[in-house]
Amino acid sequence: MTVRFPAEWCNTDLGEYRECAGTYERYPYDSVPPLDSARFTGSFDWLGGPSGRPSSVVDEVEILEAAVARVGHTLPADFLTYHRDERLALSLDTASPTGCWQNFSVPIPSPVEPGAYLVRFFRDQQDCVMWYLYLRPTGETFVVHSWRDFEFELAEDDEAEPEEEGMEGDGIRWCAPSFEEFAHRYWVEGRIALAGYQDEPLEDPQLSAYAEHYLTHRSDE
């Protein structure tokens, strides 16, 4: 059984460009600026590329990689490149306007799809939302988010119903086709939000082009 998750992006407001009903909001995926997936080859050129020096979390990555292998899966190459490299790793932490941080979970059996696993890699500081790699037996890998901490539920052997009533896929939402594409969108949005908080102009063309989508969309309405 292959589950098709609803596609929604989850993040905070972008100042004048995008409103948010609370700390976070889920936005229909077709409402966020489109990205060219062909650009995301695992080079992370938009972060300056890998430094070649090991990151502070490289040992954690090795432990995670071994745990994922034990359940018959592999971590995607772009995920490994990012977390192993000193220049790249923790870039999302520093760009997060809501205090999110890199945090690995054990491989967690999917609650809705036999043979698939979730691996948490990023979470809000108050556990409002968590982001996971979703690993399918076919080798397909993508990024999802949820309000639920599936690792905690696994440890507690929680048999309760999902906290959110009526949520398809147990509250799991598809949000990016690859780790690098997720990282790029989150990094861009984080820098836009932080610039707004500090009343700074968007001098980076990547940021201004992304923000322009919202201004254009607003004028079209």
Image (spheres, helix red, strand yellow):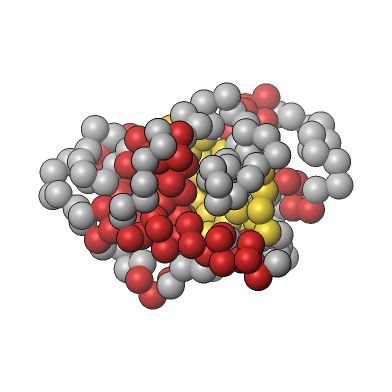
Q: Is 166 left, or right, of 52 in this rendering?
A: right
Query: As displayed, is residue 159 above or below residue 118?
Result: above
Determine the residue positioned at 37% across, 50% down. 202
- Looking at the image, which residue sits at the far left? 52
Determine the residue positioned at 13% across, 49% down. 52
- Looking at the image, which residue sits at the far right? 166
Q: Is 82 left, or right, of 37 in this rendering?
A: left
Determine the residue positioned at 21% across, 44% down. 87
Which quadrant does the N terminus fall into?
bottom right
Which quadrant of the structure image shows residue 83? top left
- The answer, for residue 149, to whether it is visible in the render is no
Which quadrant of the structure image shows residue 162? top right
Which quadrant of the structure image shows residue 84? top left
Image location of residue 131, percent across then percent down: 54, 44
Q: How many marks?
A: 0
Q: Is 121 left, or right, of 94 in this rendering?
A: right
- Quick one: 219 or 217, which is closer to the camera? 219
Which quadrant does the C terminus fall into?
bottom right
- The answer, for residue 128, to whether it is visible in the render is yes
- Quick one: 123 or 138, which is closer to the camera? 123
Image location of residue 176, percent across then percent down: 53, 59
Image location of residue 42, percent across then percent down: 31, 63
- Quick one: 32 or 164, which is closer to the camera? 32
Q: Is 41 left, or right, of 163 in this rendering?
A: left
Query: As displayed, is residue 1 above or below residue 61?
Result: below
- Quick one: 13 or 212, which is closer to the camera? 212
Image location of residue 125, percent across then percent down: 52, 26
Determine the residue positioned at 79% across, 34% down. 163
